[in-house]
Image (cartoon, rainbow, N blue to C red):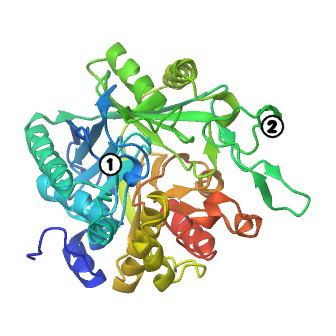
Amino acid sequence: MKRKENSPITRRDFLKSSLWAGAAALTPMARGADRMPPLRIARFRFDVTPPVGHPLCGGWIKPVVDCEDELEAIGFVLLGVGKPIVICAVDWTGILNDAHVAWRTALAEAAGTTPERVAVQCVHQHDAPFVCLHAEKLVAAQQDGLRVVEVEFFNRCLDRARTAVKTALPKARPVTHVAHGEGRVEKVASNRRVALGSDGKVRQMRGSSCRDAELIALPEGLIDPRLKTIAFYDGSEKILACHYYATHPMSHYGQGHVSSDFVGLARKQRQKDEPGCSHLYFTGAAGNIAAGKYNDGSPEARLQLTQRIYEGIVASEKSLSRTAIGKVLWNTHEILPPTNPVFVADKLREMVANKKNAPADRIRPAMTLGWMQRVANGTPIVLSALHVNALSILHLPAEAFVEYQLRAQQLGRDRFVATAAYGDGGPWYMPVKEAYPQGGYEVSVANCALAVDDILTRGMRALLTI
């Protein structure tokens, strides 16, 4: 099916392109009587660092001045389970709507699979690109220099993705064993929504960094303190390790210095320890979780947070114990939550056009209009999960609250569930239903209505009931 570059994908187009994947997604491949073919993993990575002058965080903070450490897209292709499966972590703030479909389509074409068998998750650093192609068109039409993303750079990244995957496929390694582990991370994550008034409304937010002694003194609040690891082996050799932890990954940002921030720096430190093993980091459901209790926004704090995440990775890997791979399953579930009724399209367009507004107050409405257009087109979000033996890797969209991650672990029953959020960023924040009447920043910019809670939970249950 031929389609113009960057043109919207309708629900009909999407379903036609992924028809085979939908039919095969629920088919388990098991060793033994069914004679599952040998599994292989092709590992890839490529640079996604934006050039000087490129917008950061969608265009409402200072653009790129320089690069402190490079941004990467790191992933793998799993071969031998029907059509290939692709999983990729990207050091960007977010990839929304058509842009996310474009990423998955590019990786799918290169791997010889369908977009439904591709998961692309952002790590969510803020000194990084935040891409919504629909919003870019809307602000570019204002002709006053406001930008969300340089489309040429975005397309170059897709070309690099195709090249990286095609180069990796002939180098695929056998994968025979899998292992899981977890370790507690100390003094990083804290809940942002702990300062509630007597009326039950959010009074103050602790944020990604904080210097308010009263807010710092408040408890951590609801978090998931465990960093989880799922690793793949060729015999006794560990060749790939995926790490999962739920917190906003920002120490300090906004001055134009591109960085993978403390979680990326920790990942790179671990990568140096084990150059023969590809290390991937995924941010969990961290919509309401950040390092504010333990981060004052100083360069010194970034170093401390980096070390704590690194120690969490090492602790998680200490408990790894290999088991032979006996069963592999990839399944998917489509959702398309309704738009939050507080948003009115005409008012959003007025905000985009009002040149007196700050860039953030013009670009955020443009991104919401992108979500509204997506809902009108009927283009679904695809939730997905990779199950290996008794392990499950769950892929969620956007900035889901940590409650969804904890809920997924309960839904998984006796399975070891690792959650990667920040997939398709179209919904922006995805609060739980109890948070909506509390208000607060996250609720104010949540593109989906309160019904998202039940819709997303049903999707997780469908993926984890196997």
Q: 148 above or below 309?
A: below
- Out of 107 and 188, give the one closest to the viewer: 188
- Out of 122 and 212, give the one closest to the viewer: 212
Q: Position of residue 346 (x, y in %)?
A: 47, 85
Indicate the amino acid at tag 2.
Pro
Q: Residues within 10 Å of mark 1 (few under 14, many from 20)?
A: many
Q: Farthest residue toward the top? A: 273
Q: 287 above or below 261?
A: below
| In front: label 2 or label 1 | 1
Task: Say whether residue 116 is visible.
Answer: no
Q: Residue at x 20, y 57 (%)?
A: 151
Q: Farthest residue toward the front? A: 356
| Residue indicated by mark 1 | 55
Secondary structure under the numbered disc 1 in the rendered image:
loop
Secondary structure under the numbered disc 2 in the rendered image:
loop
Indicate the amino acid at tag 1.
Pro
Q: Position of residue 335 (x, y in %)?
A: 45, 74
For the N terminus, give its image quadrant: bottom left
Q: Residue at x 53, y 63 (%)?
A: 460
Comes first in the chain, label 2 or label 1? 1
Q: Position of residue 229 (x, y in %)?
A: 47, 33
| Residue indicated by mark 2 | 219
